[in-house]
Amino acid sequence: MPVPSTANLNLNLSLTELCREGLLKEALHILLTLYNAPTNFSIYIQLLQTCISKKALLEGKQIHSHINERNFEFATCKPLQNTLIRMYDKCGSLVDARQVFDQMNERDGFSWNIIISAYQRHGYPHEALTMFHRMQPTGVWPDQFTYPSILKVCAEIRDLEQGMDFHQSILERGFLSDDVVANALVDMYAKCGNIYKAREVFEKIAQKNVVSWTAMISGYVQNGFCDKALETFKQMQSAGVKPNSMTFASVLPACGKIGAFKQGTDIHQIIMERGFFSDVVVTNALIHMYAKCGSIHKARHLFDKMCQKNVVSWTAMIAGYAQNGVLDEALRLFKEMPKRNVISWNAMIAGYAHNGIVAKAMEIFKDMQLAGVKPNSTTFASILPACAKMGVLGQGYTQNGFVEIALEAFKQMLLAGVKPASTTFTSILSACAKMGALGQGAVIHKSIIEEGISSEVEIANALVDMYCKCGSIYRARGLFDQIPQKNVVSWTAMITGYAQNGFSKDALKLFELMKQSRTYPDHVSFACVLLACNHAGLVDEGCKYFNCITDSYCITPTIDHYVCMVDLLGRAGYLEATLNFIIKMPIKPVAVVWTCLLRVCRAHKNISLGVFTATLLFELDSKNPATYVLLSNIYAEVGKWGEVQKVRRLMKDKGIKKIPGCSWIESH
């Protein structure tokens, strides 16, 4: 082995020192202008790592060329090749990374891990899976660095079945004790909709760190279990694990979604104590939370105090005003923005659309195009529901008119060269479903097939829902059976379709199949099952399913579940049992529960319980005309016309007008 010359040693030392100080351009200048070349491949690795830290792709390519031209013997050095792949990956050139990978004569686990991770991070999940499956036949087995990347892929494409296979492989190879692997499993299960399995893995983590807790909290929020997210956040604090910025950014949306203002302010206090008040991501989450909870002034106070606002900050504040109906201030703030981009415009369009001011939403949509800002899929995802909202608010359009407007916006999207995203298709299918526009829905279905995305679970779910709501139950079932990876939304949509179209027994059979498929039902699934039992008068089955909500799945029943049970028991004539059920409710019965009981009292002509129930409703809301009408009709059913007149006079004296659609039973 030749001994390096003094000049080469000095060159190596100079380059090492410059890399240590981050002076890449100076190091590169020396490398490219001197005749001598580094005699140690580790010098090139240091140079490439400096390129990674500075995201310097051009300089990285120059170093790569220098290796090929001046030190060709290093070109086949495995550690150097791995560093080249990593440099190209981190600097954004996946094509070059793959080219270096393909040129390697021999690859180790590090080589495969880098390329799999690169494909995953650059948004090519299927290519990452392909590389994973190519790796094992070469004699290289996955390790604790491979599994986190491949589990992220499963999470991204919502492939629960393959994720469970990887889980089994992790168990067999003994990597579950690795915190990073376990955390990735929690995240995968949560994103694939199996929150119960996510919790099971989470509980088995011996030393839960901040990433573990944050993954679990985020998973609960993503799956709609906001109460559980807040409960887990408290458990995290009790365990002595300190939250980081990602934890706060994950838990605050839970407060916003359920209007948990008190919990939100408590978390705000913790943020102040922990010194995260200057973190832009955390402050943006706080603005969003306060706006969602209706405290727009607190949101604005935080916004005004921010030293550095990014586009998310402005968008959060604008959206907050819009969500709270303060559209003038939203528009004023929008005009003050230092620089508007497509996200800013989308916030304004969505704001007006969500408040039912569809004409203004469409006007801003046109202004956006005139300003030279190209709409994206999110823009159209706001415009299409806006068209549907016209129908809901009855703004003078015929039902077919709404769908035509939505379809016209959809055509504009295609003409603008914007490829429809899944959310765009689901929005327009939702519009068709609301209007019962089966023909137009079928046209959109054809477009989906042409795009080759009919197997995507979100799209398939929307198609099933549309066909169910349009009464085409058999076509819905045909599509449902073709979904390769059904999630809880898929099953629930089909169960709901059966229940709403009078196929109660089919709904219950499908629910049992859902449980057998390892898909865990959520609160919506159970509400649909109880609806099916209600329509078919299946009291025993309904009671069984209601009890297993808590006993088997640890889900806290909602008001919707209680109302279903009150209606089910009441319709069957078990009025005393119905009253006892309401009295024993763990949460305070709200007006809708008592109104349901009042309706069944009318159906069974039970005056005494009807009067008792109406009295309670008057205490809760003495201005609700529906209570007076129902009580009057109960009296009328049994011929007590004097009492009917008393109720009508009481209503008149209080200045309460009968709402349209509530009919009096005429006296004789």
Image (spheres, rainbow, N blue to C red):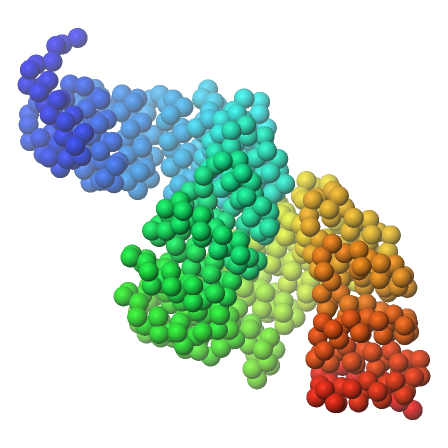
Above or below, 588 against 626 in this view is above
Give the quadrant of residue 118: top left
Q: Work out which residue is located at the far right of the displayed protein and give it.
A: 639
On the image, the x and y values in percent for residue 488 come to: 64, 49
Residue closest to the eye, 424 or 52: 52
Taking the spot 22% from the left edge, 22% from the top edge, the residue there is 42
Residue closest to the eye, 194 or 630: 630
Taking the spot 49% from the left edge, 29% from the top edge, the residue there is 179
Q: Does residue 278 appear to the left or right of 439 in the view shown? A: left
Q: Work out which residue is located at the far top of the displayed protein and give it.
A: 1
Q: Does residue 390 appear to the left or right of 29 in the view shown? A: right
Taking the spot 28% from the left edge, 34% from the top edge, the residue there is 87
On the image, the x and y values in percent for residue 420 come to: 47, 60
On the image, the x and y values in percent for residue 186 come to: 54, 37
Above or below, 643 against 537 in this view is below
The answer to whether one can see residue 302 in this image is yes
Above or below, 54 against 441 in this view is above
Q: Work out which residue is located at the far bottom of the displayed protein and give it.
A: 668
* Quadrant location, the C terminus: bottom right
Give the quadrant of residue 190: top right
Tag count = 0
Residue closest to the eye, 329 or 390: 329
Give the quadrant of residue 530: bottom right
Q: Does residue 161 appear to the left or right of 85 in the view shown? A: right
* Quadrant location, the N terminus: top left
The answer to whether one can see residue 130 in this image is no
